[in-house]
Image: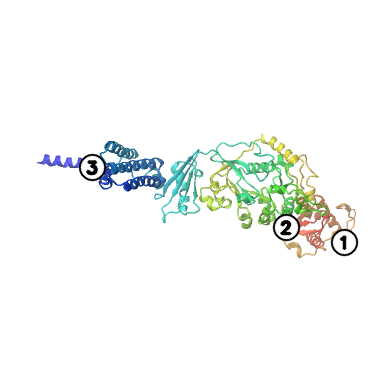
């Protein structure tokens, strides 16, 4: 009795186990059986009906198409397998309904084909798991690990070194912000660097987007500079400065293009020490200077350390200090002059045609001519290297007006500095520089360089620091926004590049654009010899040597506060026997009268103008005061008087004055 009970119990346990193991594999076989029953029943109803035959045929096509459409978010193999199964089953049922299930080859195809289809689904299930039924795909397992269990991966595009997968999140429970927060965990799960995984949200949906994975960093090996990409082309054509991590070229544009929906652009170039900012600047400048219809102004407080081979190619280059002050003043007056010329010649914005000689009879500039006869207006690029020094001297909004107005004047501004924080650059200036090349930096400075949306999409220049020089993210018009979070790397300049840069500079002198009368005339009218004499006292490279300038900028009103309360005439020097000190060429053996002292001050201004220093303040006269016994309050009073007489004009900085050229008095 006990043995029989044991046998029954054992038999029941084995049967239950087998039934449990067989259950997951039963649905395909039940489907085959159901098709057989359905085909037999349909034959009894519609064997002689032509309309039923047409309806069943159309139903077969429609059902197969619906299966293919419904499987668009599954894997290609599963989608194809499902469509074949539905097509075969519905086709057999249509044949059985019209001709009978036992007619011709229908019985054989039912037995053999049905068994093959059912077994194919059993095999598919067995291969997906080694122990028990499948509870989720590999994609599902990955998403579960990173906290996106309810998300679905749909269409997947596989390119060389790039995988793009459509991601659909659970409606009402997840948003694209959840994906942005999970990117670093996805990179960890895939054992990839953080910059290799990014997310591109769908602008029309808060729960859809594309997950982009670049498994191999193709930027590890630096790409040596190979020379300009398009020598002699227009500045309207793209500037090629490097490549993206998938191997495609990194290109930027400067002038606007209405056909492409792109505005003219100013650039912020930001990166910490050792991030490759110098090579990035050389990539950009060699591309710019190799174009036929552009001129370039450069301010570089580092004495042209990186750019010396290119010096002959610049229209105007200064080393900083008062030279940069003069350049900024000139830009503020050149921009409206250029805008006026473009408007007069019916250009809503700069185009390559504006750089050609103007011959349109409708815009004749000469009363005795039937054609315009004007020279063209080349594009203007103003580059402010190590701009933190300039911003400290001129104020954190020194470039605001220039940046806001220059686009319509055919001018692009480049501002390069290490840390574009708001204590160095005003929010207005930063807003006027929306295009940015962000190199490696301190992780805390990422938000100063890149928009939050680009950082959320996976861009993290702080992960590089100074360990990967040349690596960068580029946010600019003309670039697909999906590329904003894609790492790129600029080309590397080796010592061998120096000879090529020198040849490029000589080519630019012979074949590049020269300053047009409008730009040169406006600069001359504002800063005089600081611009017209920029090549007269040239060094061996052909570039102007800028006089030493102090970096100290005096603050105050028309008179400096510390000078205003003092009597400017109180300390004129007394005569000393035997004193033969020269006051700008005049011997002083007696105390000069106030009028004579003012004349000497006027001669001092002439000396500054002749030397090309067109922006001055009390500090610039300190050596002269020390040598001749005059005081800062006296100098401040003379500066005020000269301004009232039209010899000086106030700048945007208190305590600093622009010398009005003698030939163009105010």
Q: In 3D space, how far apart are the residues under numbered discs 1 and 2 (Cα atoms)?
A: 26 Å
Q: Which residue occupies the foreground of this view, 433 or 377?
A: 377
**185 above or below 665?**
above
Q: Which residue occupies the foreground of this view, 524 or 301?
A: 524
Q: Is residue 538 left or right of residue 229?
A: right
Lower sequence index among marks 1 and 3: 3
**335 above or below 79?**
below
Instruction: State if disc 2 and disc 1 touch (CB < 8 Å).
Output: no
Res. 25 visible in picture:
no
x and y, in percent, of residue 461 in the image: 55, 46
Disc 1: CA contacts within 10 A as few (<14), some (14-19) or many (>=20): few
Which quadrant: the C terminus? Answer: bottom right
Which is closer to the viewer, label 3 or label 2?
3
Label 2 secondary element:
loop
Lower sequence index among marks 1 and 2: 2
Which numbered circle lies on residue 19? 3
Q: Residue furthest top?
A: 496
Which is closer to the viewer, label 1 or label 3?
3
Residue under pointer 1: 595
Q: Is residue 212 left or right of residue 115?
A: right
Q: In 3D space, how far apart are the residues under numbered discs 3 and 2 (Cα atoms)?
A: 93 Å
Label 3 secondary element:
helix
Disc 2: CA contacts within 10 A as few (<14), some (14-19) or many (>=20): some
x and y, in percent, of residue 76 in the image: 41, 41
Instruction: Give the residue drawn at x 66%, y 34%.
Output: 496
Q: Which residue occupies the foreground of this view, 191 or 197?
A: 197
Residue under pointer 2: 554
Res. 36 visible in picture:
yes
Q: In 3D space, how far apart are the residues under numbered discs 1 and 3 (Cα atoms)?
A: 118 Å
């Amino acid at each position: 009795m006990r043995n029989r009970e044991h046998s029954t119990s054992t038999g029941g346990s084995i049967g239950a186990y087998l039934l449990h193991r067989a259950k997951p594999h039963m649905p395909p076989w039940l489907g085959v059986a159901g098709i057989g029953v359905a085909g037999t029943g349909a034959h009894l109803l519609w064997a002689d009906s032509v309309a039923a035959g047409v309806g069943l045929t159309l139903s077969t096509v429609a059902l197969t198409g619906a299966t293919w459409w419904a499987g668009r978010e599954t894997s290609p193999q599963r989608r194809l397998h499902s469509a074949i199964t539905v097509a075969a089953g519905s086709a057999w049922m249509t044949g059985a309904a019209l001709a009978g299930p036992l007619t011709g080859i229908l019985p054989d195809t039912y037995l053999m084909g049905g068994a093959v289809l059912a077994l194919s689904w059993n095999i598919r299930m067995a291969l997906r798991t080694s122990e028990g039924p499948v509870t989720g795909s590999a994609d599902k397992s990955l998403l579960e690990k990173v906290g996106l269990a309810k998300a679905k991966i749909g269409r997947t595009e596989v390119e060389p070194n790039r995988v793009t997968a459509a991601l659909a999140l659970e409606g009402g429970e997840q948003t694209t912000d959840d994906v942005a927060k999970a990117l670093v965990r996805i990179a960890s799960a895939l054992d990839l660097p953080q910059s290799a995984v990014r997310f591109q949200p769908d602008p029309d949906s808060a729960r859809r987007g594309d997950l982009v994975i670049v498994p191999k960093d193709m930027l590890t090996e630096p790409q040596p500079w190979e020379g300009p990409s398009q020598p002699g082309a227009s500045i309207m054509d793209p500037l090629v400065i490097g490549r993206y991590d998938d191997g495609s070229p990194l290109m930027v544009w400067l002038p606007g293009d209405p056909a492409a929906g792109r505005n003219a652009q100013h650039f912020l170039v930001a990166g910490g020490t050792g991030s490759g900012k110098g090579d990035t600047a050389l990539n950009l400048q060699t591309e710019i200077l190799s174009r036929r219809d552009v001129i370039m102004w450069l301010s570089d407080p580092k004495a042209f350390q990186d750019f010396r081979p290119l010096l002959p190619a610049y229209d105007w280059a200064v080393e900083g200090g008062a030279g940069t002050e003069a350049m900024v003043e000139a830009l503020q007056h050149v921009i409206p002059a250029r805008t006026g010329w473009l408007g007069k010649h019916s250009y809503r914005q700069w185009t390559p045609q504006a750089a050609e000689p103007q011959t349109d009879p409708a815009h004749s500039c000469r009363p005795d001519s039937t054609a315009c006869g004007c020279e063209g207006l080349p594009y203007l690029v103003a580059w402010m290297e190590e701009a933190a020094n300039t911003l400290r001297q001129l104020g954190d909004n020194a470039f605001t007006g220039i940046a806001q107005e220059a686009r319509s004047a055919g001018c692009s501004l480049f501002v390069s500095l290490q840390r574009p924080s708001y204590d160095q650059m005003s929010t207005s200036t930063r807003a006027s520089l929306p295009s940015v090349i962000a190199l490696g930096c301190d992780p805390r400075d990422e938000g100063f360089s890149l928009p939050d949306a680009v950082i959320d999409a996976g861009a993290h220049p702080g992960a590089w620091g100074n360990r990967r020089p040349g690596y960068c993210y580029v946010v600019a018009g003309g670039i697909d926004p999906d590329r904003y979070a894609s790492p790129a790397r600029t080309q590397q300049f080796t010592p061998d590049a120096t000879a090529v840069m020198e040849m490029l500079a000589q080519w630019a002198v012979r074949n590049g654009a020269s300053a047009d009368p409008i730009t040169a005339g406006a600069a001359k009218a504002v800063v005089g010899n600081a611009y017209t004499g920029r090549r007269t006292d040239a060094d061996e490279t052909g570039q102007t040597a800028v006089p030493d300038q102090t970096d100290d900028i005096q603050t105050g009103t028309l008179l400096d506060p510390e000078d205003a309360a003092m009597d400017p005439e109180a300390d004129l020097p007394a005569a000393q026997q035997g004193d033969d000190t020269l006051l700008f060429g005049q011997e002083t053996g007696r105390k000069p009268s106030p009028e004579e002292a003012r004349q000497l001050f006027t001669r001092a201004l002439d000396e500054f103008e002749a030397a090309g220093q067109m922006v001055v303040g009390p500090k610039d006269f300190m050596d002269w005061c020390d040598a001749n016994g005059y005081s800062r309050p006296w100098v401040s009073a003379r500066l005020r008087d000269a301004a009232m007489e039209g010899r000086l004009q106030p700048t945007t900085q208190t305590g600093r004055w622009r010398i009005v050229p003698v030939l163009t008095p105010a």
